[in-house]
Amino acid sequence: MKTRLYIAASAFTLSYGAAAFVARQNLGLGWGIAATVAAVLAFGWFIVEEVSVLRNCLDELQRRIQLEAIALGFSFFTLFLIGLGCLQRFVILSPADWSYRHIWPFAALFYVIGIVITKARYR
């Protein structure tokens, strides 16, 4: 079961890299849409596999840690987006540095921070 999760994560990573490559090479709208759809579908597959692992491979404490980490990560990311939105009223944020493709990794970062905080709580 975890093997499928790793394969799905690898598929997303590769397809996202391919979509970035297609965007840099300016291969046209058709290739761009196809690469984007492939990356989105691969990430959807990753989510399905992640939920399956959470449901079937973790004990109650680990499930609780993951749930709290997701809640904290989502809350921190929302706070981050609100802060950026308010800041953008006063400062022009460069799309080259602060577009959607640049800020989504913060969601993963905040999830990891949520895991660290939650695991420390249950020690």
Image (cartoon, rainbow, N blue to C red):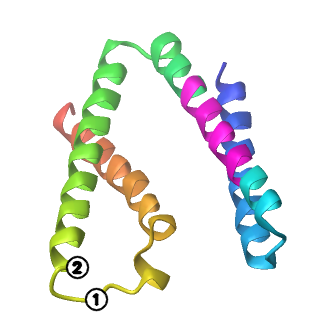
What residue is drawn where x is 24% and y is 71%? 84
Q: Which residues are magenta?
A: 36-48
Task: Specify the quadrant of the image occupied by residue 23.
Answer: bottom right
Residue 103 percent coordinates (x, y): 41, 66
Q: Amino acid at mark 1?
A: Ile
Left or right of residue 98, residue 39 in this image? right
What residue is drawn where x is 44% and y is 59%? 104
Q: Is residue 74 magenta?
A: no
What residue is drawn where x is 29% and y is 46%? 73
Residue 120 percent coordinates (x, y): 22, 41
Assign the N terminus to one quadrant of the image.
top right
Q: Which residue is mark 1?
A: 92
Task: Specify the quadrant of the image occupied by residue 48.
Answer: top right
Q: Which residue is mark 2?
A: 88
Q: Amino acid at mark 2?
A: Gln
* 10 Å crowding of disc 2: few (<14), some (14-19), many (20+): few
Left or right of residue 48, residue 88 in this image? left
Give yes or no for contact between labels 1 and 2 (Cβ–Cβ under 8 Å).
Answer: yes
Question: Main SS of the magenta segment?
Answer: helix
Can residue 14 be spotted in the picture? no
* 10 Å crowding of disc 1: few (<14), some (14-19), many (20+): few
**Between residues 28 and 110, which one lies in front from this camera angle?**
28
Assign the C terminus to one quadrant of the image.
top left
